Amino acid sequence: MTSNNSSSNNSSLDNRSINELDAVAQAELVRSGDASPSELVEAAIARIDEVNPVLNAVIHDLRERARAEAADPALPDGAFRGVPFVVKDLDGPLGGAPYHNGNKLLKEIGYIAPTDSTLIAKMRAAGMIAIGKTNTPEFGLQPTTEPEAYGPTHNPWSLAHGPGGSSGGSGAAVAAGMVAVGHAGDGGGSIRIPASANGLVGLKASRGRISLGPDEGEPWNGFVMRGVLTRSVRDSGALLDVIAGAVAGDPYAAPSRHGSYANAVTTDPGSLRIGILTSAPGGMSETHPDCVAATEEAGRMLESLGHRVEVSSPDALAEDLLT
């Protein structure tokens, strides 16, 4: 569905060709002069216009703002200069844009966020351009994306299904090729569930790896993390290089990594001991056989790469600790 690599001759690149690239490849187009930030933004707008009326992933259109930023010579010359992205309407504000958290009251009063979250500020400092805000369940409290305030979002692979949640709007937008990157957040699976449902890469980073500032420190007693949804592992690594790092006031700070996450993607980690879960933590619900089969298949693939894989149910997930 998508490609990681840009062509050596991009003079005939059309919108579809641009939209099929991951963010690293899109940024390379700008660095090489084969495309401008404005061309990347227009390609994203064209795709949003094509598929969003059916998917309902983007609920706040920021195209004119994005066009102005793309045309501005002062657009930061960072690692992802000119690459458009979408912002989840929860888990971190985008200054000057609606911030409704899937809530009807906030929608009715037309609340506008005054400032960027630390994560969004870092993405914009890298040259990325916010092109829209995406749908989310009310206050992120459901694993599905169908708030009364904005209606349901549909899965681009099957319109009869949902994209998961709570970062379902971002997941659907990235999977549908509107953008290569979607801002997201995760407490109980809100990055990982949409990644699974939409065939994407979704990493919930360790606590303290990505700042939740300046407005939050430890929501859900430290369970909630911020991050991104992408279509390639290398995008997730390169973006983690951009967004990782604590700031003054953060209650947690994960140890700094020696070297880049982007380079780690292509570095042999050696043989790892990896635990997999084939049942719901604490027996909270029945696990679908398809999910068990997919997990076991992933385990076999990891074993084929030389890793030690064990079915594991840590004591921390025991029933008496979850109820």
Image (spheres, helix red, strand yellow):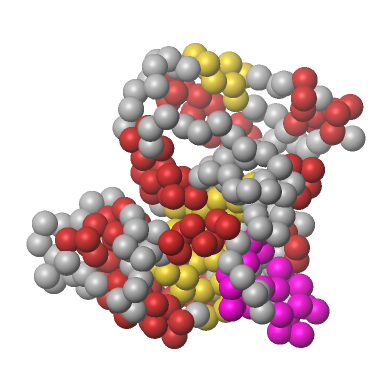
Is residue 192 found left or right of 71 in the rendered image? right
Residue stretch rendered in magenta on the structure: 90-111
- The percent coordinates of residue 278 (x first, y second) are 65, 27
- Nearest the camera: 60 or 19? 60
Q: Position of residue 279 (x, y in %)?
A: 70, 29
Residue drawn at x 50%, y 67% as measured from the top left: 86
Q: Is residue 63 left or right of residue 116?
A: left
Residue at the location (64% across, 52% down)? Answer: 212
Image coordinates of residue 176 in percent, x first then y, are 44, 64
User: Position of 43 compared to 163: left or right?
Assistant: left
Report if residue 103 lies within the magenta region: yes
Q: Nearer the viewer, residue 233 or 127?
A: 127
Q: Is residue 212 above or below residue 294?
A: below
Give whichever of 93, 60 is nearer the camera.
Answer: 93
Q: Is residue 313 visible?
A: yes
> Residue 79 lies in what quarter of the image?
bottom left
Where, quadrant-wise, is the C terminus in this rendering? top right
Residue ID at (72%, 21%): 314
